[in-house]
Image (tube, rainbow, N blue to C red):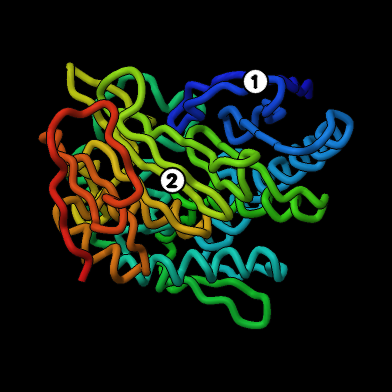
Amino acid sequence: MKTVLNCLLLIVGISFLSACGESDRALQAKFFAFGTEIDISLYGVDEATAANTIDALEHSFSEVNDLWHAWQPSVLTQINDAIAAGESIEVDDNVATVILLAKKLANESGQLFNPAAGNLFSLWGFEQDAWFESRPPPSQQAIDAWLAASPTMEDITIENNRLSSSNTQARLGFGGFAKGYAVDNAIAVLRQQGIENAVVNIGGDLRAIGRHGQRPWIIGIRHPRQEGVLASVAVSDDESVFSSGDYERFFTYEGKRYPHIFDPRTGHPANQAMSSTVIHQNASIADAAATAIFVAGNDWPGVAAAMGIDMVMLVTEEGVIEMSPAMQTRVKLTGHSGEPVIRDIP
């Protein structure tokens, strides 16, 4: 896979807002994984070191994709086939660790982050390569049948490296979690290479370590309804910035938008928010929390508290910007003229 190293301005979901001059530049690389563009920015390394590092990162992302792809042959599809057949399956320590972390985060979210809801995604047509094609939504009868089965991560058990499920309708899918896990893996690879100043950006979600020379990394948060950015935030040392939104993956049918983030309480797309953004050190946690907070909508402060998140920005379905006090001190609104609503996290 060809990798391009250069110095430029990225315009993506969460984007770098400032280009870099020759005297203060970050080397940037692009490649594709998870069906999206991966952008890597490395500061303070030469091009030879950067090229070797990017090869290692590509391998890391490919490994994660091969493990957790939801509908193409992978370890995850083997697990789901076993669950559907009412059988147990052996999993290695790495796979078990990821699934148990997902189970922990699902429990903390009150199951609003529900990686066992793969059959619901499939029912709505999102577990396919042509997920964006227009189609009628599933019948309410089919949705009600899924709700009656009520699969959650509580149905998943791992003992002595064997995974089983008490509910054959549980189907694991890590779309709201795998990107964060892949980013955390990539940061570990960078540190193994001795690189301490970098950003790993996967389709607009990212984790930044170190600094961009003498200044922090300046990140732009995408506007959910307009071109450009809604807000900017300076990140440094080690922080992840993850967003969920109804603009990411959706199809339209008879003029109505159907986004891919579902409320497991209703079986329908979550409809109380346009986007949610979370800042947290760990990318896996930030990814899952952004999903759960988006689904929670008006009830997001309680979910944030349960998941240990103190920096949140949510754009409601009406376009109102809500923030936690900690997020207010970090974010500068650039694409919004009004004042945000500040909501305390209990």
* Residue 197 picture location, percent across and down: 68, 45
User: Which badge, 1 or 2, comes first in the chain's sequence?
Assistant: 1
Residue 16 falls left or right of residue 47: left
Q: Which element is circle 1 on?
A: loop
Crowd rating for badge 2 (residues with CA inside 10 Å; few <14, some 14–19, many 20+): many
Crowd rating for badge 1 (residues with CA inside 10 Å; few <14, some 14–19, many 20+): few
Q: Can you tell which mark lies on residue 242?
A: 2
* Residue 302 picture location, percent across and down: 22, 66
Q: Residue at x 54, y 72 (%)?
A: 164
Task: Report which residue position mark 1 lands on.
Answer: 21
Q: Can you tell which mark lies on residue 257?
A: none
Q: Which element is circle 2 on?
A: strand
Q: Amino acid at mark 2?
A: Phe
Q: Circles 1 and 2: CB distance less than 8 Å?
A: no
* Residue 223 picture location, percent across and down: 30, 28
Residue reaching furthest to the right: 48
